[in-house]
Image: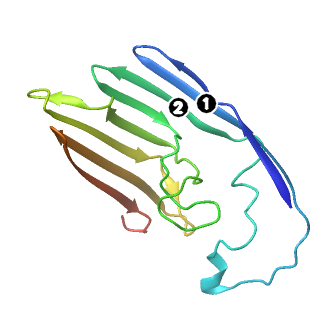
Amino acid sequence: GYGSIFSYLIQYNNKFISLSLEPVINFSKTYPLNLNNKEKTFSVLNDVPIDKNINHPGMVKNMGMTFKYSGLMLGYSNYDQWWGPGIHNSLILSNNSNGIPHFFLKTNGYQSLLDNNLKFKFNYFVSDRMTNYAGYDYFLSGLSINMVYNNIEVGRNIHLLSGGYENL
């Protein structure tokens, strides 16, 4: 088959607030396929045609609201993080993964500590409640911190998957 994707990023920014959305128009023409039925371990591979729900014709990407004040940003969005499985792969980092709806608190770029030689930035996020195939709720959260002193930069990232089991 074949297809095309068109999108327009619409943004509004001022000193205290930022709003954005990116409507996506997806068109595809597919032809019938006779595929073998996969079971057990091989039933979850992503080497078969994409489920229509992943890129439905009228989806909205990069939709979010951010409040800005004194070098901090607080908001809610489904902004692309390039984190998660891609459309045709299982890589952790992918430029075609769908954004996850999440709350975030981060700095607006690097912020000075003590003097202008020492700067830092951080980003903390926690996803909306998600439900796994067994029906249990789970959350994804992450924290990244970067420090710069003169021209030396050090950073730390951590991503946590919490929940997903009956007794948590």
Q: Are marks 1 and 2 in contact (CB under 8 Å)?
A: yes
Q: Please state which of residues 154 and 138 is positioned toward the viewer in this rendering.
A: 154
Q: Is residue 57 left or right of residue 14?
A: right
10 Å crowding of disc 1: few (<14), some (14-19), many (20+): many
* Residue that badge 2 annotates: 64
From this view, report whether residue 135 is shown above or below residue 155: below
Q: How is the image coloured?
A: rainbow
Secondary structure at numbered mark 2: strand
Q: What distance separates the C-alpha of mark 1 from that of mark 2?
A: 7 Å
Residue 75: image quadrant is top left
From this view, report whether residue 71 is shown above or below residue 88: above
Residue 13 location (% of width, % of height): 49, 18
From this view, report whether residue 107 is shown above or below residue 15: below
Residue 46 location (% of width, % of height): 65, 71
Q: Quadrant of the C terminus?
A: bottom left
Residue 29: image quadrant is bottom right
* Residue that badge 1 annotates: 21
Give the amino acid type for the residue marked by disc 1 in the picture: Leu
Q: Please state which of residues 86 and 132 is positioned toward the viewer in this rendering.
A: 86
Residue 31 location (% of width, % of height): 91, 65
Q: Is residue 7 left or right of residue 150?
A: right
Give the amino acid type for the residue marked by disc 2 in the picture: Gly
At a point 28% along the width and 24% down the height, the residue shown is: 71
Residue 55 location (% of width, % of height): 71, 51
Q: Is residue 166 left or right of residue 48?
A: left
Q: Quadrant of the N terminus?
A: bottom right
At a point 49% along the width and 63% down the height, the residue shown is: 136
Q: Is residue 58 left or right of residue 145?
A: right
Residue 86: image quadrant is bottom right
Tell me which label, 1 or 2, sits earlier in the chain.
1
Secondary structure at numbered mark 1: strand
